[in-house]
Amino acid sequence: MHCRLFSFPFAFSFDQAASQRIKILAFFSSLLVAKLRIASSRRPPLDFCIDMEFEGRYKKVQSQGGRFDCLLFDLDDTLYPLSSGMAAECCKNIGEYMLEKLGIEESKIPDLCSVLYQKYGTTMAGLRAIGYNFNYDDYHSFVHGRLPYETLKPDPVLRQLLLSLPIRKAIFTNADRDHAARVLKRLGLEDCFEGVICFETLNQPSSSSGEETSSNIFDIVGYLSKPDPAVDQPKTPMLCKPSVEAMEQALRIANIDPQRTVFFDDSARNIQSAKAIGLHTVLVGTSQRVKGADHALESIHNVREALPELWEEAEKSSNIRPSNNVTMETSVTA
């Protein structure tokens, strides 16, 4: 905070000892502030704790009656493009895990992966639904731990966009916390979000040792090819998008009002679930709107063009100044 120095038209003298004490207190106060800022910058962006300076700016803008007070972002293929190749590598790792760790026949893996993803939101959730038991940390370590994170580069354009808005910003991903932390660090965005809602936020730790697999595996592919009305499709014990239950739980944990929140995701299914619970929705990765999407962006960099009111509200605050040096892409559907 900057303090303006005023001069007075009369003499005013300080006791030298008192002046020295003030200088000493000012020094230690500045040192404490510096340490707190360093600690804040080092903490993992994984817990819902609000930086006090951020909170002050957020409340000031909120008090002006803006339409939205929170931005909720998916992580993978939303904050960085699908063209990074990370999704393809992740799919490959999932297939290898199913082959090496769960003993699933290689010829069955492509169809099974597709069905589980479509029916349960993630292949992992689907594997648990049909009877496979495995350690969640082992799964994440195998699937995400071997990803080529070095392909992700810092994104100063997105960073500037995020920092130019003094409202709440959070991540909601189906991935584990370690993966989220690594991605945000590679993108240079680790200090841009209030917190991260991840796999561990919504799910209890696995009790499996990592060697267990059920002998009674439900044939989901066969069941879907010839549905039996007398047989119920098994449910997953996991909570993840696009489950409405998972999304509602995430909002409760983060104390987010869906009516005042903009949700960004690359998945049309997630967008539709988000719309169903009252979120304002933005589909990322295409300019073609789908059912449930209020906006569609080719790139997350287009967000200012799609939602200019966010910046108009922010620029009313004395703590925010508009930035004119950020180059935007132009493909926006709203």
Image (cartoon, rainbow, N blue to C red):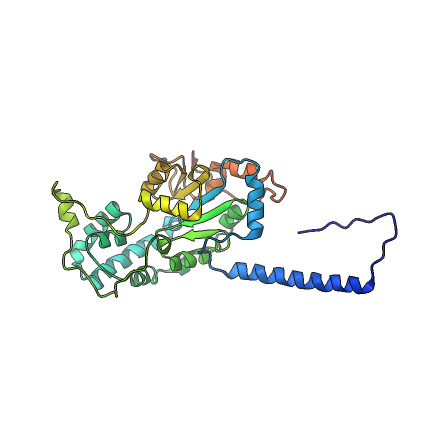
Residue drawn at the location 48% of the way across and 43% of the way down: 70
Q: Position of residue 116 (x, y in %)?
A: 23, 49
Residue 14, by quadrant, is bottom right
Question: Which quarter of the rendered picture does the C terminus lie within?
Answer: top left
The number of callouts visible is 0
Q: Position of residue 317 (x, y in %)?
A: 61, 40
Q: Position of residue 108 (x, y in %)?
A: 16, 54
Q: Is residue 324 visible?
A: no
Q: Is residue 174 visible?
A: yes
Residue drawn at the location 46% of the way across and 41% of the way down: 302
Q: Position of residue 179 (x, y in %)?
A: 38, 58
Q: Is residue 118 left or right of residue 226?
A: right
In the image, 75 versus 17, the foreground residue is 17
Up-down: is 139 above or below 281? below
Residue 314, by quadrant, is top right
Residue drawn at the location 38% of the way across and 47% of the way down: 250
Residue drawn at the location 27% of the way across and 54% of the way down: 124
Q: Is residue 101 left or right of residue 307?
A: left
